Image: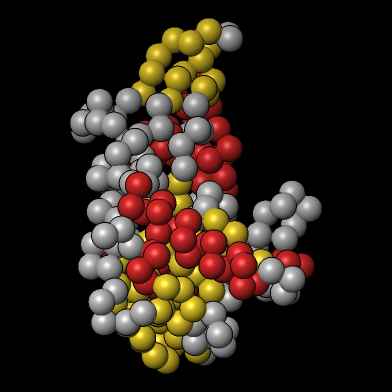
Amino acid sequence: MRVPSTEVQNNFGKYLKFVEVHEEIIVTKNGRDIARILPCDEPHKSLVAEEAAEYQTRGGRVTYEEFLELVESSDQRFELIDGVIYNLASPSYGHQYAVREIMGTFYNWFKNKKCIPLTSPFDVTFFKTEDNICVVQPDIIMICDPDNMDKKGKYKGVPALVVEVLSMSTRSKDIIKKLELYRQCGVKEYWMVDPKNKLINVYVLEQQEIADIRAFQKGAHEYAESACFSGLKVELAEVFLS
């Protein structure tokens, strides 16, 4: 991200937040690059491996407007949850394999139906409160309210169903923070897919509460089934690598 020196001087704290999530800040003056602001902790650590730890700021909450400025100026992918920025690492083969198989089933099942399944990267904006706007990129979402797509093609509604495939770098966030986010914001069903344990937990969410949790494990079950969409099911043997 290239930023004029006067802008950095006037908003230094904001740009420090960006540096903490490993966004390189190049300071310019009179059209010339004059300085770089880089993180001190592990500056050469790669973000392309799924095992790379996610980065989050320690310099205070990030506003929705600051987040938009960051993502519009960066080639990296980020999420914003409760004022904290998370840097998204590149997924592994097993992760993408599971996404492909689930999405393939969803695509076929929902063809010619009202709801539309989409895969990441695609931003979903949740309005938890007036001053707490969150932006995430679930692995798969089910959009049944296309009217909530704005003129720029940005979705600001609530998906009926969300799928997250767990990985080393996202496990804690997906299990705790995203479950809480989806519960509070009115998602009806959350599939938590665990390739390590060959398990899919289906959380049924009603009136901002967890109404039920259904576990489907390869070897013990043939399919994982939706609670909200009767007849929708995914063959577990196809989702997880042997």
Percent x, y for residue 225? 45, 82
Q: Residue at x 48, y 10 (%)?
A: 33
Tell me if 4 is positioned left or right of 52 in this view: right
Q: Is residue 80 visible?
A: no
- Residue at 39% across / 90% down in the picture? 212
Quarter holding residue 42: top left
Give the image location of residue 150, x and y in percent: 74, 57
* Left or right of residue 199, residue 146 in this image: right
Residue 99 seen in render: yes
The image position of residue 142, as x and y in percent, is 59, 69
Report the label total. Answer: 0
> What residue appears at the point 74 percent right and 49 percent down from the top-left corner?
152
Q: How is the image coloured?
A: secondary structure
Q: Position of residue 231 (x, y in %)?
A: 55, 85
Residue at (26% x, 60% y) in the render: 242
Question: Quick one: 136 or 195, which is closer to the camera?
Answer: 195
